[in-house]
Image: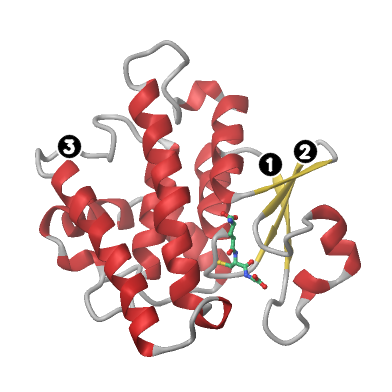
């Protein structure tokens, strides 16, 4: 059994979306990160010492870190094909992409959204925005051959993660959708019923319709 601790419009969206796409049963617990600050309460810190969302409790065991949860779900549901199997040619590029998105792009966004955690000034925030745009350049180049998904012909965990992260740029001066190939990719992903469904379940109306 799965229980997802989430907050609307945050990093938990990728996991929430993947669970819907997998069609597996799960329960949700919604956290208020702003007013009640549920992430700081001892009961939640016992599940996730970092006090972040998402946390997915898997048969009683709490697991944090978005990329790790996506990869774990792919491993537990191999029939969905959301991760290239060990030993397959795409395994290396998939691992590389997941690590790149979680090690490079997510921290740049974290610093952009939480400037007080680093240097809270306009120049520092602009530097993080530039780091984000460098990743969009790279993703755009990867998608330039018209492949439907980030790693080729197959939907993988990298698509759940990348698409969610492109959403995070919606209020930036130059959002991910401004890149031609990345923008076309995002539009294809936005047509997926499961992505539309997770927006509805989380009460989100912006971005999904462009
Ligand atoms: N490295 C974590 C980062 C998750 C993260 O930063 N989540 C944010 C929401 S997008 C959060 O929980 N913020 C609340 C807080 O830090 O107090 C992951 O990949 O899951």
Q: Quadrant of the N terminus?
A: top right
Q: Residue at x 51, y 59 (%)?
A: 198
Going by the image, does 176 lie left or right of 21? left
Q: Nearer the viewer, mark 1 or mark 2?
A: 2
Please, is residue 55 above or below residue 128 in the view? above
The residue to which callout 1 is attached is 25
Crowding near the residue tagged with mark 2, few <14, some 14–19, many ≥20 C-alpha atoms within 10 Å = few
Q: Can you tell which mark lies on residue 1?
A: 2
Q: Nearer the viewer, residue 176 or 16?
A: 176
Measured in 3D between alpha carbons, the distance from the residue under mark 1 to the one under mark 2, in whole angstroms, is 7 Å
The residue to which callout 3 is attached is 147
Image coords of residue 125 (percent x, y): 38, 80
Upstream in the sequence, badge 1 or badge 2? 2
Measured in 3D between alpha carbons, the distance from the residue under mark 3 to the one under mark 2, in whole angstroms, is 34 Å
Q: Residue at x 19, y 60 (%)?
A: 183
The coloring applied to the image is secondary structure
Image coords of residue 192 (percent x, y): 35, 50
Residues tagged 1 and 2 counted as in contact (Cβ below 8 A):
yes
Q: Residue at x 36, y 88 (%)?
A: 122
Going by the image, does 201 lie left or right of 43? left
Q: Nearer the viewer, mark 3 or mark 1?
A: 3
């Amino acid at each position: 059994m799965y229980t997802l601790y989430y907050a609307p419009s945050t990093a938990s969206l990728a996991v929430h979306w993947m669970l819907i796409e997998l069609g597996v049963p799960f329960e949700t617990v919604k956290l208020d990160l702003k007013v009640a600050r549920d992430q700081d309460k001892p009961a939640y810190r016992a599940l996730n010492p970092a006090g972040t969302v998402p946390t997915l409790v898997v048969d009683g065991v709490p697991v944090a870190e978005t990329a790790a949860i996506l990869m774990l779900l792919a491993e537990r549901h191999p029939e969905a094909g959301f991760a290239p199997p060990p030993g397959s040619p795409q395994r290396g590029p998939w691992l590389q992409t997941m690590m790149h998105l979680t090690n490079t792009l997510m921290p740049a966004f974290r610093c952009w959204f939480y400037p007080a955690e680093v240097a809270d000034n306009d120049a520092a925030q602009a530097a993080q925005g530039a780091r984000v745009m460098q990743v969009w350049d790279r993703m755009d180049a990867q998608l330039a051959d018209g492949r439907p998904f980030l790693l080729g012909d197959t939907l993988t965990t990298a698509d759940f993660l990348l698409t969610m992260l492109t959403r995070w740029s919606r209020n930036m001066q130059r959002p991910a959708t401004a890149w031609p190939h990345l923008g076309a990719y995002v539009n294809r992903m936005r047509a997926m019923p499961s992505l539309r469904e997770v927006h509805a379940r989380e009460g989100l109306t912006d971005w999904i319709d462009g």
